[in-house]
Amino acid sequence: MTKWMADQDVYLGNPNLKKANTTTEFTAKQIQEFIKCKKDPIYFAKNYIKIVSLDLGLTGFNMYDFQEKLIRNFHESRFNICKMPRQTGKSTTAVAYLLHYIVFNDSVNVGILANKAATARELLGRLQTAYENLPKWMQQGILSWNKGSMELENGSKILAASTSASAVRGMSFNIIFLDEFAFVPNHIAEAFFSSVYPTITSGKSTKVIMVSTPCGMNHFYRYWHDAQRGKNEYTATEVHWSEVPGRDEAWKEQTIKNTSEQQFKVEFECEFLGSVDTLISVTKLRNLVFEDPLINNHKGLLVYEHPVKGNDYIITVDTARGIDHDSSAFIVFDITTYPYKTVARYKNSEIKPMLFPNIIHDTARAYNEAYVLVEINDIGEQVASIMQYDLEYENMLMCAMRGRNGQQVGSGFSGSKTQMGVRMTQAVKKLGCSNLKTLMEDDKIVTNDYDIIAELTTFVQKKQSWEAEDGCHDDLAMCLVIFAWLVAQDYFKEMTDTDVRKRIYEEQKNQIEQDMAPFGFILDGVDDDDEFVDESGDRWFKADEYGDRSYMWEYR
């Protein structure tokens, strides 16, 4: 029989918890049960795990078939990734296995990480509830018991924290559980994997469990598809909503009626869809597939095709100050044949603006002296100037303001008022986004870069413009927008045999006219004026050099 010594043998007055160093005597049956539970985590979960149900309150864990499969995979495989619908008990299943792991293994460390620290602590709370309801003869004595951590007398510890490098830096884990990893912002996921993940996977028996409902094409999407293609060591497990008892076509119809078809596809059919109001259609985004680059220097530059002698290339550049996780970026396009291809790209949030031109310069030289078009609204103007004057790069595309016709691009213009790139105005962005939609959806631009695809899935409409949704970035997407605007320029026809501009204008004539002239085309004598204000409120003044009215416009 088990002997308990009154209140002094409980932890901090909690009658459901055993204090460390409490003497326990086991019966023969209890010893057999202990051994059986240690060998079989499914048996343990079925017979000893208690959960809190909305309908039944505290009750036993009546496992579904797919939940048994999950625990079996967790137990037998080091790396697991699970794509599952909402409300399928995925977190509860993982918690049941983690409890088994710390009870029946000595001196192990377990991390429960979620997109928010509060969510991770809530999961730990479920584990603690299940622990309190274990028979005392099965419990390990408690050394510490907190909202964010607990430690058992067998030396095993468990920590709950947010999925970030800072939360678990310097710590080592035997198991790390990443809950709803698809909802962790990309920049946090990148920092986590670069700094923490290597220490987790360094051991021969360490485990990683990644469980989530999809949320666009992000890090979870990347790991899932790599697992399916056998490009990583993860065991991929997918659960369909119909595997949950009680969910049938009638349930599906009711759920769609109470939410939406789009929401159902994401949350229950687990499709890797981004936001609803994306610039590029969901159908097109769903069919985009990323590939591994030929070269990855791990400093932001990814190469998918090496330069080909005789081919024509264009580089479009979006420059950031290197703060608030914004990145300086550029994309290299091969415009030799149709459709156009993204053959290389660069993205780095830490590069200093004054060092950025050297990377652009070296890449442009490598790709047959590629033409370079820089967005110059902010620090980009300095980047373009360094390229032109300090590095003496000749193939810089410049722009001049041509009245109501907007900015016109070329490789150089007479007069000192020509700007060293394109200024991103409302009109430029509208035309660029409109053309990009056509180019992408008609397969006139081909890209297989993961980050480009990921940004397009979160490049959404906000009021009258398009930009990254909250918590996401659009640095590479804006490089695409700049290129799409360039394609519509007269000068682009001179660089390629394919008159894409004409095709796009024919397909979208009405839309483009709306974008460029929302109040209609009116001959109001603007070309004879000395100044005018464009759609975005920017004021332009006609340059007067040496008494010559040159039709060049200066932005102020």
Image (cartoon, grey):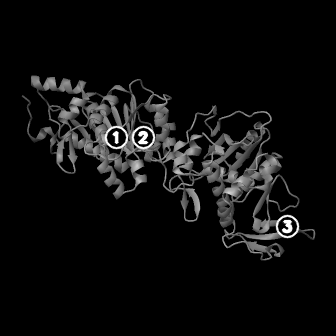
Amino acid type, residue under disc 3 in the picture: Tyr
Q: Is residue 541 above or below residue 147?
A: below
Q: Name the element at disc 2.
A: helix
Q: Is residue 40 above or below residue 312?
A: above
Q: Earlier in the sequence, mark 3 or mark 1?
A: 1
Nearer the observer, 287 or 74: 287
Among the 4 quarters of the image, the one containing residue 96: top left
Amino acid type, residue under disc 2 in the picture: Val
Q: Which mark is on residue 551? A: 3
User: On the rendered image, what quadrant is the C terminus found in?
Assistant: bottom right
Residue 418 visible in rendering? yes
Is there a contact, CB below 8 Å, between mark 3 and mark 2? no
Q: Name the element at disc 3.
A: strand
- Is 406 on the left-hand or right-hand side of 133? right
Residue 309 horizontal/vertical position (percent): 79, 33
Residue named by callout 1:
159
Residue 164 horizontal/vertical position (percent): 45, 44
Amino acid type, residue under disc 1 in the picture: Leu
Q: Name the element at disc 1.
A: strand
Residue named by callout 2:
168
Q: Nearer the viewer, mark 3 or mark 1?
A: 3
Residue 75 horizontal/vertical position (percent): 32, 28
Q: Farthest residue in the left direction?
A: 1
